[in-house]
């Protein structure tokens, strides 16, 4: 398992009004180190801005490896767990998948998705943030830096050329880089540590 500390570090400096647009990148997932025996609640509590009240009041839908989960004491489990979270979704789908919903019984599976008794091991959790949670909490995550797949970042930038062209400065491993060289670098690497800031920090 590659240590994130050894990854190349990419920093975008952008105008403050453009920063929120980058939070949609979090829908494709960022990698955060955890452990297989760590609970979802503890993992979320380590993230900036995810206070007990915020998790209780705002995080309404959680999917662990594609299965909706109510219990925040559920362990992340081994391998490469994927945790997707969002605020309340609209309509019947939102009611069915909402945490602690009366409609939870309508799910195709309500079993605990993690088998007990597994040996604890370090894991990289792919965290995906959606809707208002991505906007409210994503800016701080991007500011401190997150591990992203270069393919996801490349696709994100390719679909938002106007936003990409407005980047004020790009710095790769403490050296300035232009757009063309950055795209070449992203195509030749798999993961990168991405930080997005503004001219005023």
Image (spheres, rainbow, N blue to C red):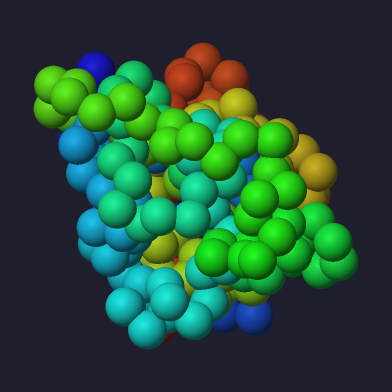
Nearer to the camera, 71 or 185: 71
- Estimate the x, y position of residue 47 in percent, counting from the top left: 31, 63
Q: Closest to the observer: 89 or 106?
A: 106
Up the image or down, 31 lies above or below 61; here it is above
Looking at the image, residue 100 lies above or below residue 187: below
Position of 17 compared to 92: left or right?
Answer: left
Dividing the picture into quadrants, the one containing residue 140 is bottom left
The residue at the far left in this view is 120
Q: Is residue 20 visible?
A: no
Q: Residue visible at 61% across and 41% down?
A: 28
Q: Position of residue 48 (x, y in %)?
A: 32, 70
Residue 37 or 86: which is nearer the viewer? 37
In screen coordinates, is 168 left or right of 34? right
Residue at 24%, 18% (x, y): give it: 1
How many marks overall?
A: 0
Tell me if I can see residue 91 in this picture.
yes
Residue depicted at x 33% and y 38%: 76
Q: Position of residue 60 (x, y in %)?
A: 57, 67
Q: Quadrant of residue 110?
A: top right
* Image quadrant in which you'd find residue 103: bottom right
Looking at the picture, how far across and down is residue 82, in whole percent? 47, 36
The quadrant in which the C terminus is found is bottom left
Residue in the picture at 58% in, 45% down: 68
Q: Is residue 85 left or right of residue 117?
A: right
């Amino acid at each position: 398992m590659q240590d994130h500390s050894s990854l190349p570090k990419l920093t975008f400096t952008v105008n403050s009004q453009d920063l929120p647009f980058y939070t949609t990148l979090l829908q494709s997932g960022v990698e955060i180190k955890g452990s297989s025996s760590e609970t979802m609640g503890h993992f979320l509590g380590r993230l900036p801005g995810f206070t007990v009240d915020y998790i209780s009041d705002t995080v309404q839908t959680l999917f662990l490896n594609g299965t909706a989960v109510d219990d925040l004491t559920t362990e992340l489990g081994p391998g490469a767990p994927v945790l997707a979270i969002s605020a309340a979704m609209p309509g019947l789908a939102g009611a069915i998948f909402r945490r602690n919903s009366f409609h939870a019984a309508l799910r195709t599976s309500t079993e605990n998705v993690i088998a007990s008794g597994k040996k604890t091991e370090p894991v990289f959790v792919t965290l995906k943030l959606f809707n208002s949670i991505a906007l409210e909490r994503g800016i701080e995550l991007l500011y401190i830096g997150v591990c992203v797949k270069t393919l996801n970042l490349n696709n994100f930038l390719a679909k938002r050329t106007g936003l990409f062209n407005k980047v004020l400065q790009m710095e790769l491993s403490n050296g300035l880089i232009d757009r063309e060289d950055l795209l070449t670098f992203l195509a030749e690497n798999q993961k990168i540590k991405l930080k997005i800031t503004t001219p005023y920090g």
